[in-house]
Image: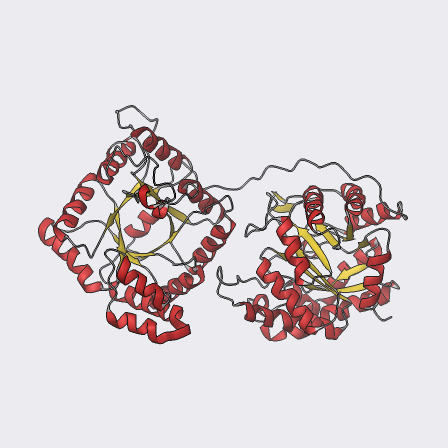
Amino acid sequence: MESLSANKFMQLIETSPVPLLSDGAMGTLLNARGLGFDACFDALNLSSPAVVGEVHRAYIEAGSQIIQTNTFGANRYKLAAHGLEGQVAEINRAGVELVRRVALASFREVLIAGDVGPLGVRLAPFGRVQPEQARQAFTEQIAALAEAGADLLIIETFSDLYEVREAVTAARQTCDLPVVASVTFTRDDRTLLGDSPAHVAQSLHASGADLIGINCSGGPAQIWRILRQMRAVVPDARFSVMPNAGWPEQVGGRIMYPANPDYFGEYALAFCEAGASLIGGCCGTTPGHIAAMRAALERQPAGCGPSAGELSMPVESSERMTSPDRLSLMAQRFKEGKFVVSVEMDPPRGLSTFKLLAGASLLAEAGADVINVADSPMARMRMSPWAVCELVQRTVGVETVLHFPTRGRNLLRVQGDLLAAHALGIRNVFVVMGDPTAIGDYPDAMDDYDLVPSGLIKLIKQNFNAGVDHAGTDIGQPTAFFVGCALNLAPQDEEAEIKNLRRKIKAGADFVLTQPVYEPEPARRLLTRYEEMHGPLGIPVLVGVLPLFSPRHVAFLHNEVPGVTIPEGMRARIQNAGEGAAREGVRLAIELVEQMRGWASGIYLMPQFSRYDLAAEIIEGIKNTEK
């Protein structure tokens, strides 16, 4: 039996009074058969086809009209983790042939959907894979699926619109198969990078996808809600929905999904009534869920009944880094003599934190030890940094440094914010004066302060860390803040800078963050002079490293930023690099770090223009030189 044609698929989509029915989870059922999630499920098409075939057969018998190939991760990037990047075509072709053989043996006519998942790597600027590289990888996989005889493509479980659009483009350039482009959403109905359902629908519709899809995410209730939002903005589009069986929970070491088959059966009709043309299941769904959906649709051969009401969603539970007894991990790294890499990130200007979290995740994976979260840099309105610190620590699992300016805070607010930050698990605080409001978004805003930086350092170290507030009132238990202060290693007035540093250290400062350095030896001389005057510094210094990006960027820093002087040789290297200026800036940054490694305790990396991919390259370059 030959598989149905692509034209047949579109005919069915256009003429069927009820949605076509796809299958459910593959990974869930393979895991239930004893395969760990760290295994390469795609390679089973070659090594254990009978196991995969059992899953396909179960879904065919449950009533699936479309069977997705076991190729979700069969791209060069994901397969490389298992040393199988050279078998992309073989694994994908085997996935299509396996469905065809099982369907023949079952005497059922089904459509074969070539399953294409995300590459498992981030695209620039939140990763280092360029769009053209991503498109090449998708083309390689899609070509194999099409040549093997797939009837359509389901491009699914994407959270990055840039990536899914590259996949759709690769499909359009490679074959004529119909394309279902499906995106996954977080609990607040946004993609991981902050895109709304309306924006996703408009973008995928414009990309040329035949069906706009929503899959994975939460349970049917959330998917139903998102489907309605999408259809409202592109009413002429066709839609696919494949929800998880609810939000997963870990019970007794196993991942459990709460939504049962009967519940999915009810929602099959709700999806139909809301305008879905293709339905199925994702994580946690089984042949039982598909059979229930099949039965529900068969009871409505001429159309769909009333939609189900919106259901309440389970409360998210996740482990937080908020233990009141937790001490600073950065302090422990300094104690162990490790070279610490700290990276600065600015809070978002609006509500969405997803791009920031994606960047933080990339930096953590590259080897950053700690993320510095700035507070209203340049006096521009942004989200409160201690909220961002908590999100980064909870979501990404990397420790943060909270920038804590004294400007604009009276004594009551200073202490209240410190208590809140500590309760949220924040242990590292960088005390600074802060930028004057006159230069920012609200020049007439109050600019007063009750404490200078050395005074705030003293309040934290000698009061809060001793268990009392500024008035000497007991706060219940001592805080465990690790406090940093600022230092300019190239000041116009060295005497004043050394005097201020001495005052901050006497107040109790635990570490130092410096402004950007481009000339290591003059910078080191200021520290040497301090030691000649006052003895050993006694606390670690994280030296500022601000990567150069382009000739225009260099000219701005050199001519307009106080305290920053870029040597002529560096300026020339960036100028001569042409289109490779950003990469040359990465190399210069790594060279600077190596020159300062002998006397610096670490670096304070300041990525420009949110180019976290370049920052990650610098971090990895630094880490490689340590080996």
Pick whichever, 229 or 385, lies toward us.
Answer: 229
Q: Residue 497: image x %, image y %? A: 17, 49
- Whether residue 304 is situated above or below residue 412 in the rendered picture: below
Residue 156 shows in the view: no
Residue 464 shows in the view: yes
| Residue drawn 38% across the image and 58% down it | 607
| Residue 64 quadrant | bottom right
Q: Residue furthest left?
A: 533
Query: In the image, is 395 to the left or to the right of 103?
Result: left
Q: Residue furthest front?
A: 444
Pick whichever, 255 or 435, lies toward us.
Answer: 435
- Whether residue 271 is situated above or below residue 458 in the rendered picture: below
Colour logic? secondary structure
Pick whichever, 606 or 600, lies toward us.
Answer: 606
| Residue drawn 37% across the image and 44% down it | 376
Query: In the image, is 414 to the left or to the right of 149?
Result: left
Q: Residue 32: image x %, image y %? A: 69, 53
Query: In the image, is 176 to the left or to the right of 559?
Result: right
| Residue drawn 66% across the image and 60% down it | 206
Q: In the rendered image, which quarter contains the N terminus?
A: bottom right
Q: In the rendered image, which quarter contains the C terminus?
A: bottom left
| Residue drawn 37% across the image and 67% down it | 550
| Residue 209 quadrant | bottom right
Total labels drawn:
0
- Whether residue 306 is situated above or below residue 587 in the rendered picture: above
Q: Residue 554: image x %, image y %? A: 32, 65
Query: In the image, is 208 to the left or to the right of 474?
Result: right
